[in-house]
Image (cartoon, grey):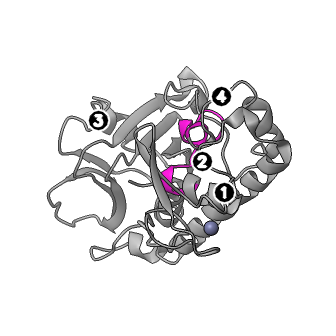
């Protein structure tokens, strides 16, 4: 599943090809993915200029003067920049053509989304899918004080509080497991039992982990262009994630796997208290 780093790397990869370009055609090969496409999408976008490409959580935002196109990659989606006459393959559901190139959305499992938010309806942050999101993890509002303050009434395990996304977005399963390891915090500890000092370590760990993944993905940026490219699922070496039964890279203790909610957590009982 694309996580925040993959979406951010996608944003950086497509931006030079889309920014300040005029949409010349919109091709929809089905009526929707997770939700129906806006029925008048071609009319909305044709002839309009893409002003900038932003991101909020895992939503890519194509900003136009009259509104914003929200794109979510779902479970299996990816975006590619291709020459505009490139034939579509199976699971290529959406093309946004900008002259000689196009942005193509490929999504085999069809949990992705393409939605429109008109400027007259207010800032895109007020969209129902965005307004409940927590702060961005790589921006200044995300700090230990915020995490500490907002977790005082939260007795759930810290891992699940991170995944809930209402305090901070984009800390998915991989990055939560890895960050808790680096901060030496047991994923089962109740969020309201963690001190401000330990939250400082956790914030630093989350930011380092996400930034490292984005940097790693940066080396794949050119792959967003061209038919042979493989887009951004970064194979990384993890401390604990998906290492059940293997020795901790710090102390050699066997890494444990547990279920929290519906998700697997991986941790070292010796390093994480
Ligand atoms: Zn260990």
The location of residue 70, given as percent across then percent down, is 45, 40
Spatial CA distance of label 1 from label 4 is: 19 Å
Real-space Cα distance between discs 4 and 2?
13 Å
Q: Mark 1 points at which residue?
A: 272
* Depth order, front residue of 91/242: 242
The boundaries of the magenta stretch are 160-175
The tag earlier along the polypeptide, 4 or 2, is 4
Sequence-first tag of 1 and 4: 4
- Position of 176 with respect to 190 (left or right) is left
Q: Using the rendered image of the protein, determine whether residue 122 is visible from the camera's viewpoint.
A: yes
Circle 4 sits on which residue? Answer: 155
Disc 4 + disc 3, Cβ < 8 Å: no
Q: Residue 34 carries which label?
A: 3
The residue that label 2 is drawn on is 187
| Residue drawn at (70%, 58%) of the image | 184
Residue 228 position by quadrant: bottom left
Q: How far apart are marks 1 and 3 (CA)?
A: 38 Å
Q: Which of marks 1 and 4 is in front?
A: 1
Please state the horizontal and vertical placement of residue 201, each as a whole percent of the image. Answer: 78, 55
Q: How crowded is mark 4: few (under 14 residues within 10 Å), some or many (20 or more)?
A: few
Decide which of tag 4 and tag 3 comes sooner along the chain: 3
The numbered mark, 2 or 1, whose residue comes first in the sequence reads 2
Q: Which of marks 3 and 2 is nearer the N terminus?
A: 3
User: Residue at position x 51%, y 34% from top?
Assistant: 67
Residue 214 in picture, x, y percent from top left: 57, 66
């Amino acid at each position: 599943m694309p996580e925040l780093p993959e979406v951010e790397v996608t944003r950086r990869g497509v931006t030079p090809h889309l920014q300040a370009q005029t949409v010349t055609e919109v091709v929809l090969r089905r009526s929707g993915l997770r939700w129906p496409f806006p029925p008048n999408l071609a009319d909305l976008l044709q002839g309009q200029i893409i002003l900038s490409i932003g991101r909020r959580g895992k939503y890519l935002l194509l900003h136009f003067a009259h509104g914003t196109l929200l794109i979510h990659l779902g479970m299996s989606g990816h975006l590619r920049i291709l020459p505009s006459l490139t034939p579509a393959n199976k699971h290529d559901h959406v093309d946004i053509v900008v002259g000689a190139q196009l942005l193509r959305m490929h999504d085999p499992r069809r949990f992705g989304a393409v939605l429109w938010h008109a400027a007259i309806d207010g800032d895109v942050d007020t969209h129902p899918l965005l307004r409940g999101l927590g702060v961005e993890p790589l921006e200044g509002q995300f700090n230990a004080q915020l995490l500490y303050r907002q977790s005082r009434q939260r007795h759930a395990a810290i891992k699940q509080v991170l995944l809930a996304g209402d305090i901070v977005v984009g800390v998915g399963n991989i990055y939560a497991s890895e960050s808790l390891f680096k901060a030496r915090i047991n994923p089962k500890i109740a969020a309201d039992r963690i001190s401000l000092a330990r939250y400082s370590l956790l914030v630093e760990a989350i930011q380092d982990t996400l930034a490292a993944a984005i940097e790693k993905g940066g080396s794949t940026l050119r792959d967003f262009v061209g038919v042979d490219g493989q887009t951004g699922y970064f194979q990384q070496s993890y401390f604990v994630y998906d290492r059940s039964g293997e020795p901790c890279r710090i102390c050699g203790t066997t890494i444990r796997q547990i279920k929290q909610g519906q998700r697997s957590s991986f941790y070292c009982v010796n390093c994480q208290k």
